[in-house]
Image: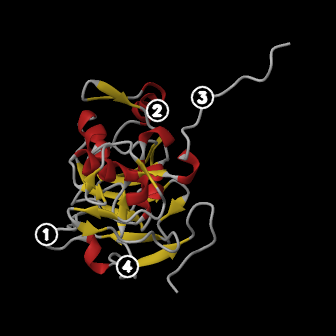
Amino acid sequence: MPGPRAGRPRPQGAAATVKVHKLIAMSGRCSRREAEEMVAAGRVALAGKTLAVGARVPPNARLTVDGEPLGKPADKVLLLCYHKPRGQIVSSRGPDTVFEGLPPLPRGRWISIGRLDVETEGLLLFTNDGGLANRMAHPRFGLEREYLVKSAKRLDEELLRRAVKDGVAVDGGRVKPKRFALRPAGKGAGSWYELVLDEGRNRVVRRVFAALDAPVGRLLRIRFGRYALPRGLAAGAWEYLPAPGAAAAKPA
């Protein structure tokens, strides 16, 4: 009988090393994708030698980014939810950004898990761990995003059912909602819809409604994966959440 199938040989010393972009993300400086871009741009060095994409280094390697020492990895993974108000931008630069109201970190920085456009309100998640940000936001994991959408146009319920079954034509492709339904009428003119997607492409909700000739009057994200916008959390307020696979973590 044939013996056990041999796997690909592991490079000597690989068990004691980590890919450079992962180590940068672990420091809380940025996501893995952003870290890879830093390395590709020649901004990361070890002992004065510029590193290439895919390079492996010891976990305690003293890297420099743009000539400045890279901070140490965060002591604990933190996850925070923020109720983004309309009009704020998801950027670390410029006036009225979402980062201005977040609590300070003793080490590293907050990384947004995905984005919301300036006119969209609701749940926005932040972490100090670039690896977690990458896992939660990457399209291959297909985490659901749930939205409440207000439009002046009332869409036929049969049209909503077809949208779930066949998808909506958007930019040469199709967006297939997991759920698309009318919500009970509230005060004021217009109709409210519940829309659940398993993707987070730029302005995808607005594009779906534009394809249905239903202009968006208000857009609110109320859930990302298993995390829902807490009831009573005011716009501009935040609170800590338990990180995936961990107990609720808060700074000491």
Three-letter amino acid code of the residue under disc 2: Val
Q: Quadrant of residue 177?
A: top left
Sequence-wise, the earlier of marks 3 and 2 is 3
Residue type beneath disc 1: Gly
Give the residue number, with chain letter if any, for mark 1.
Answer: 94
Q: Residue at x 28, y 59 (%)?
A: 120
Residue at the limit of the structure toward the top, as seen here: 1
Label pair 2/1, CB-CB below 8 angstroms: no
Sequence-earlier tag: 4 or 1:
1
- The answer for how far apart the CA atoms under marks 4 and 1 are is 20 Å
| Quadrant in which the N terminus is drawn | top right
Residue 251 vs residue 216, the one in the foreground: 251
Image colouring? secondary structure
List the residue tagged with mark 3. Answer: 8
Residue 146 % position (x, y):
45, 52
Left or right for 23, reference 91: right
